[in-house]
Amino acid sequence: MTANLNDLRVQIDAIDRELLDLLNRRAHVAEQVGAVKRLEGSPFFRPDRVAKVIEQIQHANKGPLKNEHVAAVWREIMSACLALEAPVRVAYLGPAGTFSEQAALQFFGESIEKVPCDNVDEVFRATASGGAGYGVVAVENSTEGVVSRSLDLFLTSPLHIVGEVSLMVKHNLLRLSDSMDGIEAVYAHPQALAQCQGWLTTHLPNAKRYAASSNAEGARLASTNGAWAGIASERAGTQFGLHAVAPGIQDEAFNRTRFAVVCLPQTLPAPPASGKDCISLVVSVANRPGAVHDLLVPLKNHGVSMTRFESRPARSGQWEYHFYIDLQGHPSQSNVKAALAELQQLCAFYKVLGSYPVSD
């Protein structure tokens, strides 16, 4: 016999009340955990603990819910409970609706205290000064490469990387009217303009392109003039009441941006090994023949894989460079530890930017 729709809805309502009771029981325990952490001086936010809980829940999942949906639900449950223990303040490139905000919410959940910043420098400054516990900054795009300003700021910042978010970036052309007619100017972050330059040249060849501090700021500007358009996320379009007159205009369909989650070491020490980790370094070497080649020898000898190698001018006026390197592994592994020790001996400048679990 087919169940009656109203009867099914009554069942769902009853289950929802049971879920709410259980969630509040969990929240009460979380408050007690917060009190213990406060007495011990332990970090309130532990991304490794979040990952472990989600992994255990996914392992216990028998369906029909998909594991990725279970993970999303539990991340929000833990975020809400953590907000009861101690509010987590997170700085990111604002205003509301940026991909940086989206990355922050994907990593921490919705129950954070948002600290939107005008530029990447301010994200680093707010996090280093204690105005925010954590910062989220873009470091690399699959189409346009590294975000130079973020890499430069890591050189002198006391912050270290404790996590990362890899975000699929879909750029949309946004404007007040639901038409592409009469667009005279397009505003967006320089990276977004570069990632969409082919589409813009083909479809809006006469529209001027202007750099904005963020894509969300470009969307805000587009909301002030009917002849202007912005390139930003759907979230930004909703925030500023804009139509997506052309969705997915990025030149590369699989356009991803990698964000680093940063904080002071006293806020959260380097996470323990997860089995799928990355170590980020910045180094420089003396300007002599074979110096860069020599950097690779300890990695080869100890079987450590390098996943990224970028150079940036050292700004010394002597044609010297800093090299940004990502390695697979964790410093607690014996072969990685040995390789890092030998590598450091070869460097004129050596700084570990962080060791952290790799984003899926």
Image (cartoon, rainbow, N blue to C red):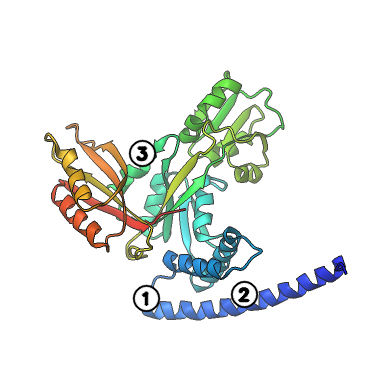
Q: Nearer the viewer, mark 3 or mark 1?
A: 3
Which residue does the image show at 23% across and 62% down from the upper left? 334
Label 2: element kind: helix
Q: Looking at the picture, which amino acid does disc 2 mark? A: Leu
In the picture of the structure, the residue carrying the numbered disc 2 is 23
- Which of the 4 quarters of the picture holds residue 337? bottom left
The residue under label 1 is: 41
Q: CA distance from mark 1 to mark 2?
A: 26 Å
- Marks 3 and 1, the one that precedes in the sequence: 1
Q: Mark 1 packing: few (<14 Cα in 10 Å), some, or many (20+)?
A: few
In this view, the residue in front, 1 or 32, is 1
Provide residue 305's location: percent of width, then percent of height.
29, 49
The one of 310 and 175 positioned closer to us in this rendering: 310
Q: How many marks?
A: 3
Q: Residue at x 27, y 60 (%)?
A: 331
Taking 354 as reference, is 217 above or below it? above
Q: Looking at the image, is mark 1 or mark 2 earlier in the sequence? A: 2
Q: Position of residue 199 (x, y in %)?
A: 56, 26
Residue type, label 3:
Ser
At a point 26% along the width and 51% down the height, the residue shown is 304
- Say few, some or many: other residues with alpha carbon within 10 Å of mark 2 (under 14 / 14 to 19 / 20 or more): some
Badge 3 crowding class, 10 Å Cα cut-off, few under 14, some 14 to 19, many 20 or more, is: few
**Residue 156 appearing in the image:** no
Residue 148, numbered label: 3
Horizontally, is 75 left or right of 159 in the view? right
The N terminus - image quarter:
bottom right
State the separation of the CA atoms marked 3 and 2: 43 Å
